[in-house]
Amino acid sequence: MVLLKIKFPFQKRVRLAQGLWLLSWVAMFSGAITFAMGVFLKTELHRRSEVMHSMDIHIVPNLLMAVGLASVGINICAGKVCQDSLDPTRFPRWKMFLPPFFCFSVFLTSLLLVAMILSFALQPSLEESLKIGLKNGIRFYKDTDTPGRCFQKETIDRLQIEFQCCGNTNYRDWFEVQWISSRYLDFTSKEVKDRVRSNVDGRYLLDGVPFSCCNPASPRPCIQYSLLDNSAHYNYEYQSEELNLYNRGCRQALVSYYMGLMNTIGPCVLFDFLLQMTILVSLRYLQTAMEGVIGQENVEIETEGYILEKGVKETLLETKEKMKKLLQFARVGDASAVTPDTEPEADKPATA
Amino acid sequence: MAVLPIKFTKTKRDKLAQVLWVLNWISVVTGIILFSLGIFLKVEINKRQDLMAESQLQSVPNMLIAVGLIACLINFLGGKICYDCVDTNKFLRWKLVMLPYIICTFFFTLSVLVGALMCYSMHGQLEEALTLGLRDAMRHYKDTDTPGRCFLKRTVDLLQIQFQCCGNEGYRDWFQIQWVSNRYLDMSQREVVDRLRSNVEGKYLMDGVPFSCCSVNSPRPCIQHQITNNSAHFNYDFQTEELNLWTRGCRQALRDYYTNIMHSVGLTVLIIWLFELSVLTGVRYLQTSLENVLRQGDPECESDGWLLENSFVETARSNLNIIKHLGKFNQINISSNGDPNLDKPPTAHYGPDNVPPKPLPMAS
């Protein structure tokens, strides 16, 4: 039972080949664009890698880059096959090449769908990775004299300024961490000693934030210290003050940013996937239609094109049988390699 | 004596016409580039309009926009002309237009050159505009409740963050102005009243800067207030502290930024000017060689092309004479009482022996 049979007269075959050749050029550009988008996404993720704990999310741009490159190659092959299909003498040399080519291409193209699904599925993982990365960044903010961590302050400051965010979830994250290094604390002063003694770990905690949390849109000069103390500042009430600092947390800002990027890339990848599948299906029809022509004297006869010669189940069984035979052949080859020394001895006639 | 004559065979003429057609289309593209450079410059200047005082800065992008548009038109026409020049019959259509076209294009290329030079000569105006503009912006930093000035604080803060600069020439400029609004000053406190009384104008001056002056490269949390007071902060010496605040002044930062843009734009315009000039030279050669073909009558013959028929001096003299006589067109010669035939020697030729005929007898 043939799958999805279509009749192909000569003209239709020729038009299919020509249209497919043009389409393969379009798909080649589309594949190049997918590659470029993968590269862009990877560089964006890499730029903020200092505040990300794990690299799980990098699989999405990696897949996009790999499939983009591969699809350029696939489409070049498809174009060549189309060109040769118009000439019945040149077409037969593609006969052995095409079935594995189809399997390989379908697999690669489905990876695009996988990439799209992963970009949504990995969002919790991205959020978790940012949570841990930002927590570490805020914790090591003060360690500008420790090698390996000395750039954390600059990274976090630049991040908060660029993404207009403060802290991990909000600005209160800074109250729980000592972000002023002990090098700059006067331990002879009473205030410092009180604060250090007020908590178990002996950390200098205060209700203040770094300058990078300040919002330029605020009508008053930035209030960074004694944020929860209304009496410390004239005409100030922290519960109703909204413009003084950035309200957003950096984790949410970064997640929105990356999700926005991936949502923009999504439709382009989907378009590339659909285009590629169209080309592969049409190429299969072209191949099967041309197979009917090979060996015939009259090239212009009408032939049938199909996707699978037999039904899906039968094709799968056949493929399994073929695989088994291939494996057996390999095994028999091994066996004959082991026994040639013993066999001739056994067959050696008595030479007495 | 022609200026730079070149011999042109028929094939050479045809090739010249085709090449010039392509080059004219490329020139249309460069005209679009000029136009977009003008728009880019205009947008860049408008972005920081709040920080620049009134000046003639807008004339440069306006000039570039106008020149870009005219370049597109002129080169489009030039392309059409060169396309038709391959066929001598079609050239006859354009014969009378070509010389005025070439003269117009020559003056137009001069204006392109003027545009390029303007880009380079803007320094003085730019510096003055920035100094005055920044000074005013800083003075009105605190006026976030005054309509028309309420965005200045945000503009200055974003400027200092983006360009990594502080104040007009340095952070000390902030010490001389009151940048904290009176709305946020507790007038009942002694310290505030002391500061207000300490200067003639009653301004609240302090040795502090806004948060946007803070440098992200500093290893310690930013010190914004009491900057010149070493004892107010632990382990702090303001004379040796370099990383705490941005050290560059915003005037210098903006000036460098705009100078870079202007120089790049100026260089591009110069290159476009050279390209236009070469296209113009090609069109002139094509015109003169085709005119010589028409003069000689044979479309297949070899002809000369030149830039000027006579040398520079003679051409200038003849043009001046033409202009002088144009002026004399309406003037009357008063030396002979207006009669142009008086004092003229007889010039009639009366046959081989040159004897004037006897007057005919009158019939009575």
Image (tube, rainbow, N blue to C red):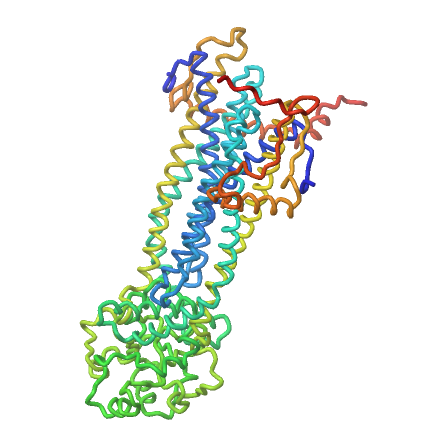
- Image quarter where the N terminus of chain A lies is top left
- Image quarter where the C terminus of chain A lies is top right
- The residue at the point 23 percent across, 80 percent down is B184
Viewer-proximal residue, B346 or A241? B346
Q: Is residue A336 above or below residue A290?
A: below
Q: Quadrant of residue B59?
A: bottom left
Q: Is residue B129 above or below residue B242?
A: above
- In the displayed orientation, state which residue is furthest to the top: A297
**Picture coordinates of residue B218, whole percent (x, y):** 44, 76
Viewer-proximal residue, A225 or B12? B12
Is residue A145 found left or right of A260 in the rendered image? right
- The residue at the point 69 percent across, 29 percent down is A340
- In the displayed orientation, state which residue is furthest to the right: A352
Q: Quadrant of residue B302?
A: top right
Viewer-proximal residue, A150 or A37? A37
- The residue at the point 47 percent across, 8 percent down is A301
Q: Quadrant of residue B152?
A: bottom left
Viewer-proximal residue, A120 or B20? B20
**Picture coordinates of residue B321, whole percent (x, y):** 57, 45
